[in-house]
Image: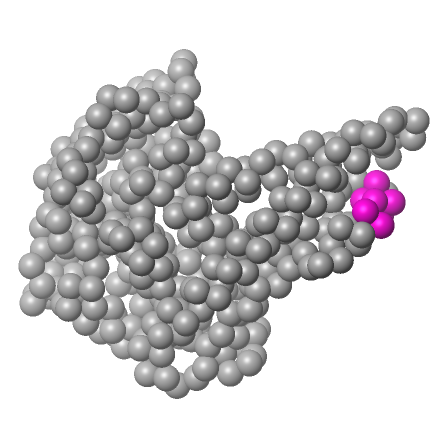
Amino acid sequence: MFFKDINISYFKSIDNLKWTCSDGLNLVLGNNGNGKTNLLDALYYMCLTKSFLASSDSVLIHQDADFFRLEGNVEVLENKLTIAASFSSHTKKKITIDGEEYDKLSQHIGRFPVVLFAPDDTDLVRGSSELRRKFFDLLICQFDLQYLESLSTYNHILKQRNHYLKLLSIKEKLDITLLAIYDKKLIELNHYISKKRAETILEFKPIFITHYNFISSEKEKANIEYETDVNSDFESIFLNNQEKDIFSQRTNLGIHADDFEWTLDEKSTKKYASQGQKKSFVLALKLAQFTFLNLKKGIKPILLMDDIFDKLDDFRIKKLLSMLTENVFGQVFITDARAERTKNLLKNIPFNCFTMEDK
């Protein structure tokens, strides 16, 4: 899969941009603040219907406009398609393929797989469990539409249940029948989602370990374990926790509290790993994400790398460049503010270059 060309109008700091892309390596160069990351975000948006930086579409509109529009001509398994994404302050988000709009936006997720390397990716190790859940949820959603829909339903019902718990704590005479309806559906979804996460980890882990061993030269043993409240007794435990939920005004148990324990030599990566080890761990996670989606989808995802050379040391850059040289990846987009450094690193690899001019 690859973008043949892109056309960006009024997206964030980019007013108008047209670019014919290479199906291999593409460099996006320019000084900081010129919109390099925004260009990657536009590609990400066309693939996943959302920004990787902003939670609201309204903040993605250029300051001098009241809408944005993204368009890309894409080739997937010899099929030529046109993705168009648009949003305005007056209308809802719209995603079309060859002019045809989806019944539901979720139908777009996974058709055009993408993997992103971002400057703050080490937060996956040192940050909250929510970030680790989002990493794996996004991975699964790109190859399993049922999981995406189930997770969306779960989050919607969880929000409703938590709202009702707050009402119950204030008005004790409220009928708890509605709570029982929420509970039944949440228990069912908990079992499905936790099962899918566990199955994915079993498949993902050996791929991740292979990549980590390559990056670290097998200096330590890396591992991932899935941690969840959901087990064979979950229904009874969940229902018996209702009084605590009402008191705390929130749902305490469920897949929304899951985490993934990442270790090196059986020690917590978050607590004990060096900065270099954390970078290796995250790099292996992203490479495993790419490999996993390639296996599941039968196509190579688009690979977006934002300021990757500023965040990795020479040893890890060398490992990554060896994979680029061996054509492990398909279409790759790399941003960098230091043009000469980047061109020198990639001097033995053919690339297409686009320079974001100073504003």
Where does the magenta region start and end?
239-246
x and y, in percent, of residue 112 in the image: 29, 42
In the displayed orientation, state which residue is furthest to the bottom. Answer: 219
Which residue is depicted at the point 68% across and 38% down? Answer: 185
Residue 151 makes an appearance in the image: yes
Q: In the displayed structure, does residue 131 sit left or right of residue 320?
A: right
Q: In the displayed structure, does residue 235 sit left or right of residue 260?
A: right
What is the quadrant of the C terminus in the image?
Answer: top left
Above or below residue 71? Residue 23 is below
Nearer-the-camera pick, 339 or 201: 201
Residue 3 makes an appearance in the image: no
Q: Quadrant of residue 74?
A: top left
Q: Main secondary structure of the magenta part?
A: helix
In the displayed orientation, state which residue is furthest to the top. Answer: 90
Nearer-the-camera pick, 222 or 55: 222
Above or below residue 355? Residue 261 is below
Nearer-the-camera pick, 39 or 319: 319
Q: In the displayed structure, does residue 241 sit left or right of residue 357?
A: right
User: Magenta stretch containing residue 240, yes or no?
Assistant: yes
Which residue is depicted at the point 57% across and 55% down? Answer: 195
Nearer-the-camera pick, 356 or 260: 260
In the displayed orientation, state which residue is furthest to the right. Answer: 173
x and y, in percent, of residue 301 in the image: 27, 51
User: Magenta stretch containing residue 195, yes or no?
Assistant: no
Which residue is depicted at the point 44% across and 51% down? Answer: 140
Which residue is depicted at the point 11% across and 61% down? Answer: 343
